[in-house]
Image: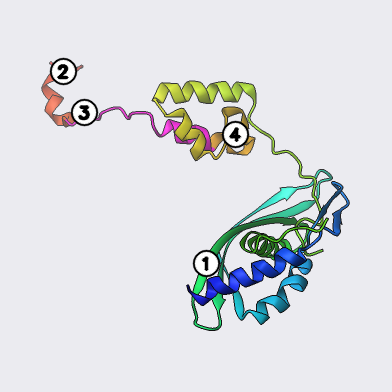
Amino acid sequence: MSEVYKAINAVMAHMAKEGVSKDRRNQQQGYNFRGIDDMYNALSKVLAENQLVVLPRVTDRYREERQTAKGGLLLYTILTVEFDFVSAKDGSKHTVCMIGEAMDSADKSSNKAQSAALKYAAMQVFMIPTEGDNDADATTHEVRAVPCITPAQELELQDLARDVGADEMKFLKWCNVASWADIPAKNYMDARKALESKRPKKPVNPQRSDDLDDEIPEFGGN
């Protein structure tokens, strides 16, 4: 067995006895959670004792701006992060991929998303049980709902899709929505143009105009 799996198993056995309790509380939604600092405190020593190194690597990032219910600006970030669990004894490693997402009104959304990815990677790799503002679970933001297309626009797009023979499920997947009613209002014109582009083009008559001269009557002649 590779040393990395022995080390992971040793850390798992230690954490099964210790656990990490949900001592932190999200005040907005009223639930307890385990913070990233709790994970650092619980794992740093036992990882070092078992010569297990954790190396993060961000492989993908998605970010968009959202508006709060009060009109403020939020940065919403989703990161895909790979963590290499490496044994310092023989260099063997195991890679874990985790998604981290977070929102922040300043410049901390990526930081929070990285912390969330690490926290849940550690919880799932080591199966950390429970005993009873840099963490994504610490706060909950109220996001303003994105305006969607009107019922009239929805019917118009559906009729257009049928007219051009578009595959409804594939088109909705392309729009990244579950139904026609979920298409954002700001994407209406793009959706319409995409459907219009599927309409078969009229064939162009390849015959040159000068070939038709004999068929066109001349007016005003003798």
Reading the image, the residue beneath label 4 is 183
Mark 3 vs 1: CB contact within 8 A = no
**Highlighted range, magenta:** 190-206
Q: CA distance from mark 3 to mark 2?
A: 29 Å
Report crowding for label 3: few under 14, some 14 to 19, many 20 or more residues within 10 A (C-alpha).
Answer: few
Question: Residue 147, image x and y in percent?
Answer: 69, 35
Q: Is residue 60 visible?
A: no
Image position of 199 (left or right of 208) = right
- The numbered disc on residue 205 is 3
Display coloring? rainbow
Q: Which amino acid lies under the numbered mark 1 shown in the image of this protein?
A: Thr
Q: Which amino acid lies under the numbered mark 4 shown in the image of this protein?
A: Ile
Image position of 215 (left or right of 16) = left
Quadrant housing residue 58: bottom right
- The numbered disc on residue 221 is 2
Mark 2 vs 4: CB contact within 8 A = no
- The numbered disc on residue 95 is 1
Q: Nearer the viewer, mark 3 or mark 2?
A: 3
